[in-house]
Image (spheres, rainbow, N blue to C red):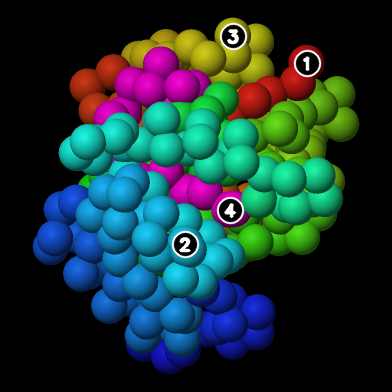
Amino acid sequence: MGKTEGPLAMLDVLVVEDHVDLAEEVVSYLRARGMTVRAADSGRTMDQAIAERRPDVILLDLGLPEEDGVSIARRLAAGVRPGDPGFGVVVITARGRVEDRILGLNAGADIYLVKPLDMRELEAAIGAVVRRRGGGAPLAARPWRLETSRWRLLTPGGTAVSLSDVEVRLLTPFFDAPESVIERRVLADRLAVDDRGIDLLVHRLRRKVESEAGEILPLRTLRSRGYAFAAPVAP
């Protein structure tokens, strides 16, 4: 596993996670990728770490002792001064419900990742947050757009990703009913494929968006329920 090249290798990342094993895994991986990484296990120790040195990105668990992650995210967002782009915040949590993701995004998180984590996805999410912050606005404030007539998906960063007919039909329910969970069988019936076919389509679409736009498609898998689009969308 080689080190990350370019601006990511210069990043200062603060991991706020009280699960020691996971925190160590994340810290170890990101350090191996060339980033400067520290860990904190609560809002209080996070504040101390920020006072010592301001991080570029904060990886924030929601289920923390003393002060929960949603409260911390709101506090971080409220403390931003005019002209200050603030902290890039990636929420990492076991809370997979749509309501929890909406709560986290509205609290000021840029991206919401559900455990168990894929370290490669986490690294890509950090890169996406850095690029968004370079533009001065958090990802949560910028909607995704689906242009069915032009067969393309517009990302928050402004990249147009061309879609196939089946990819348009896969995404349409999430844009027709924002903040809803779309059951797996509904998608399977709509696309005339089985469950494995749905998983494969979603996997390929995620890789396409990441490859072409450098952004994480926030189409999340909810075990035993289906899928949900965990980011704002525009009609």
Are the residues tagged 1 and 2 within 8 Å (C-beta)?
Answer: no
Quarter of the image where one finds residue 31: bottom left
Q: Nearer the viewer, residue 213 or 140?
A: 140
Report the residue at 31% width, 49% height from top: 44
Question: Circle 4 is placed at which residue position?
Answer: 88
* Residue 70 location, quadrant: top left
Graded by Cα atoms within 10 Å as few (under 14), some (14 to 19) or many (20 or more), the crowding at tag 4 reads many
192 with respect to 93 (left or right): right
| For residue 58, above or below residue 180 | below
Q: Earlier in the sequence, mark 2 or mark 4?
A: 2
Q: Is residue 195 left or right of residue 132?
A: left
Label 2: state its secondary structure: helix
Residue 67 at x, y = what percent? 29, 34
Camera-near label (1 vs 2) is: 2
Callout 4 amino acid? Gly
Residue 113, horizontal then vertical, whole percent:
40, 43
Lower position in the chain sequence, tag 3 or tag 1: 3
| Residue plotted at (49% across, 22% down) | 102
Structural distance between the alpha carbons of marks 1 and 2: 38 Å
Question: Which label belongs to residue 235?
Answer: 1
Q: Earlier in the sequence, mark 1 or mark 2?
A: 2
Q: Give the residue number, with chain letter if any, for mark 2.
A: 50
- Chain-order first, disc 4 or disc 3: 4
Give the numbered dot on residue 98.
none
